[in-house]
């Protein structure tokens, strides 16, 4: 990629506002849209939401009213960008169908980041996280079949498999074990910063989405499943945000946020097959080039620093959604039994019996896990659980259907303090 947004001219900020008709874009057809077109839109929605939230937080920590005005102007345009992107989702796409798209984003985006991450520790951070979102996709796919009578491959095709990953019931860890080692921005490869901002933004949007829509179901098991997985998404935001350098200034952070948007819009403009959406990405890229210019000028004027000294001369590899089935399987086979201890990743079998991991598991899981019950209930209804295993049986024998396990298990299952009781009550009387 020989593209440098610092050398391009964008649309002047005063010409970037659009009217309601322009923002109220025609949604895609859920029956014909390519799964990765949906994925690109979901990711860019998360990127825009992060840009807006970051700008609000930055404004709350500044005194200069002129800088606040500049941030407010850019932020207003980014609100419009977020609306145009998010309004591509059609009203007839159900909450569970949108959710399947969110989890496909999490799997294939994080897989891309891991395979394009120059730092070994950060690569491990992504490999650890991807197995958990991979399992969420499998859980939601079963819930979708149980509640709507449809198969998840109608939404995500066979690009991403649906089979157990690191089981969600075992993903719940003590908050102290979600803190990762931060990178040092001055020494970090610029791609590491871009990867971290991208993945953190997407996970944050997933967390926000589940926080908002998880209680909109009538079915108690659906409400409980979103509740359980929604708590993991909070863990993931902590997991990814803590790899960012906490000593970076507000203005350097602003520059990298805008650069990340340029990188992703440029990447997706190249591979989006829908001409209408491609044009939207191109328009937003030309807006973001101007936003980046403004951020760079603020950094120069306030901090007397040169943004070119921290940004790459040309962009690195284009972010691309692609199938990662074999890669995910290899990571699953190698790392399914890892858990986190402080900032490191260790086999669960290495933990002492009195470790806080097991105490936390007992506290939150009790005797009933919604994500386990979703599989059991759908298997009872259909006569089998739902899986889409394009590459063959699950590479971890202990994660195969019961009749195919030959008593093999995972270290998690052997060390489990959880005794799932499907008869346990899913409701608590709040009174």
Image (cartoon, helix red, strand yellow):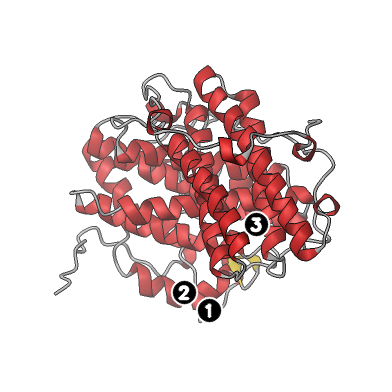
Percent x, y of residue 225:
32, 53
Q: Which residue lies furthest to the bottom in this view?
A: 354
Q: How crowded is the residue under tag 2: few (<14 C-alpha within 10 Å), some, or many (20+)?
A: many
Q: Distance between the residues labelled 1 and 2?
A: 6 Å
Q: Position of residue 6 (x, y in %)?
A: 78, 40
Q: Is residue 159 above or below residue 395?
A: above
- Circle 1 Cα neighbour tier, 10 Å, few/some/many (<14 / 14–19 / ≥20): few
Residue receiving disc 1: 355
In the rendered structure, find residue 125 and report the number of the disc placed on it.
Answer: 3
Q: What element carries label 2?
A: helix
Q: Residue at x 24, y 52 (%)?
A: 221
Mark 1 or mark 3: whose residue is earlier in sequence: 3
Residue toward you, 130 or 282 = 282
Q: In this image, 38 relative to 152: left or right?
A: right
| 299 lies left or right of 144 | right
Circle on res. 152: none
Number of marks in the image?
Answer: 3
Left or right of 15 on screen, residue 115: right
Task: Residue at 21%, 61% (x, y): give it.
Answer: 426
Residue 35 sits above or below residue 362 on the image: above
Expressed as whole percent of the image width and height from the top left, the position of residue 340 reads 59, 66
**Real-space Cα distance between discs 1 and 3?**
21 Å
| Residue 385 visible in the shown view | no
Question: Which residue is at 44% across, 55% downward?
Answer: 207
**Are the residues flagged by discs 1 and 2 in contact, CB closer than 8 Å?**
yes
Q: Which of 266 and 422 is in front in this view?
A: 266
Q: Name the residue under label 2.
A: 358
Label 1, secondary structure: give it. Answer: loop
Q: Distance between the residues labelled 3 and 2?
A: 22 Å
Q: Who comes first in sequence, dot 3 or dot 2?
A: 3
């Amino acid at each position: 990629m020989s593209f440098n947004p610092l050398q391009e001219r964008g649309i002047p900020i005063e010409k970037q506002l659009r009217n309601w008709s322009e923002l109220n874009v025609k949604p895609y057809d859920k029956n014909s849209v390519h799964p990765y077109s949906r994925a690109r839109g979901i990711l860019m929605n998360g990127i825009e939401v992060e840009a807006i939230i970051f700008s609000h937080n930055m404004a709350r920590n500044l005194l200069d009213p002129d800088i606040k005005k500049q941030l407010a102007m850019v932020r207003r345009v980014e609100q419009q960008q977020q609306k145009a992107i998010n309004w591509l989702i059609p009203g007839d796409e159900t909450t569970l169908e949108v959710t399947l798209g969110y989890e496909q984003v999490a799997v294939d985006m994080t897989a891309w980041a891991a395979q394009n991450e120059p730092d070994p520790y950060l690569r491990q951070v992504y490999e650890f996280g991807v197995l958990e979102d991979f399992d969420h996709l499998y859980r939601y796919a079963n819930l979708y079949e149980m509640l709507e009578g449809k198969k998840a491959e109608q939404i995500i095709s066979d690009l991403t498999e649906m089979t157990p990953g690191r089981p969600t019931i075992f993903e719940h860890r003590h908050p102290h074990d979600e803190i990762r080692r931060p990178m040092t921005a001055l020494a970090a490869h610029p791609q590491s910063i871009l990867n971290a901002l991208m993945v953190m933004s997407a996970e944050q949007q997933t967390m926000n989405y589940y926080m908002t829509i998880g209680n909109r179901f009538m079915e108690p098991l659906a409400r409980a499943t979103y509740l359980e997985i929604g708590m993991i998404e909070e863990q993931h935001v902590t997991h990814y945000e803590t790899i960012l350098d906490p000593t970076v200034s507000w203005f350097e952070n602003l520059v990298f946020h805008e650069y990340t948007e340029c990188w992703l819009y440029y990447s997706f403009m190249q591979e989006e097959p829908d001409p209408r959406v491609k044009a939207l990405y191109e328009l937003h890229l030309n807006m973001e080039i101007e936003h980046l210019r403004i951020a760079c000028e603020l950094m120069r004027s306030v901090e007397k620093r040169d943004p070119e000294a921290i940004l790459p001369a040309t962009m690195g590899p284009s972010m691309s959604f692609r199938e990662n089935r074999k890669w995910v399987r290899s990571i699953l086979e190698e790392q399914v039994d890892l858990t986190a201890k402080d900032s490191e990743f260790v086999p669960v079998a290495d933990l002492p019996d009195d470790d806080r991991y097991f105490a936390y598991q007992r506290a939150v899981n009790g005797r009933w896990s919604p994500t386990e019950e979703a599989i059991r209930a759908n298997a009872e209804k259909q006569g089998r659980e739902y899986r889409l295993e394009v590459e063959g049986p699950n590479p971890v024998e202990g994660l195969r259907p019961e009749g195919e396990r030959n008593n093999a298990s995972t270290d998690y299952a052997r060390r489990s303090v959880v005794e799932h009781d499907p008869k346990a009550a899913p409701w608590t009387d709040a009174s």
